[in-house]
Amino acid sequence: MSPRRIPAARDAVGRRETPLTITVDGEPVAGIEGQTLAGVLLASGRRAWRHGRSGAPRGVFCGIGACFDCLVTVGAERDVRACRRRARDGDEVRTQTRDQTRDQARERAREQAREGGTAL
């Protein structure tokens, strides 16, 4: 089954489905060129990929980049809004949690202190 609403064979505009594969937390996930990361995740059956402060699951809420509920890490870039970023073949996506964010921020501060010669 294709995650597209209009099958390519009946698409009056003539678009063609070009497959792509991203990796999410080490697991390959198939998508179609032109989909956002959120679109690929939703089409693969994932409805949530992070948790809020209360522990409630979070995924796409607004779908237009205003709410920040769909944040992921793509490669080395943190806090990417999955609803705004087009998937690219080979993207390595990692889901985020508050604990990871806090721990990584502390580690970055330690590294910067070491590089700058100042102590925390």
Image: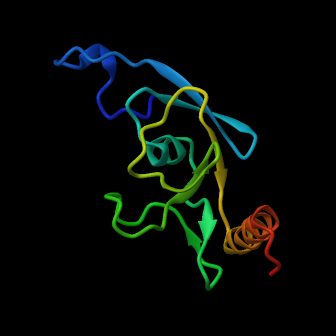
Please state which of residues 41 and 9 is positioned toward the viewer in this rendering: 41
Number of marks present in the image shown: 0
Tell me: 109 left or right of 15. Answer: right
Q: Is residue 104 left or right of residue 88?
A: right
- Figure check: 36 above or below 63: above
Q: Residue at x 59, y 34 (%)?
A: 91
From the viewer's perspective, tell me whether residue 3 is left or right of residue 77: left
Residue 61 placement (x, y as % from top left): 41, 66
| Residue 64 vertical position relative to residue 41 in the rendered view, above or below | below
**Residue at (42, 38) in percent of width and height:** 86
Q: Tell me the colour scheme of the image.
A: rainbow
Tell me where residue 24 appears, x and y as whole percent.
66, 43
Q: Position of residue 33 (x, y in %)?
A: 42, 26
**Residue 14 percent across, percent down from the top left:** 22, 14
Which residue is painted at 73% across and 71% down in the image? 109
Lateral position of residue 78 relative to residue 104, left or right: left
**Residue 90, placed above or below residue 82:** above
Q: Which image quarter: residue 49?
A: bottom right
Quadrant in the picture for residue 108: bottom right
Q: Nearer the viewer, residue 1 or 63?
A: 63
Position of 19 relative to 69 (above/below): above
Looking at the rendering, which quadrant does residue 112 occupy? Answer: bottom right
At 61% from the left edge and 28% from the top edge, which residue is drawn? 90
Q: In this view of the protein, which residue sits in the foreground, 112 or 47?
A: 112
Q: Nearer the viewer, residue 39 or 103?
A: 103
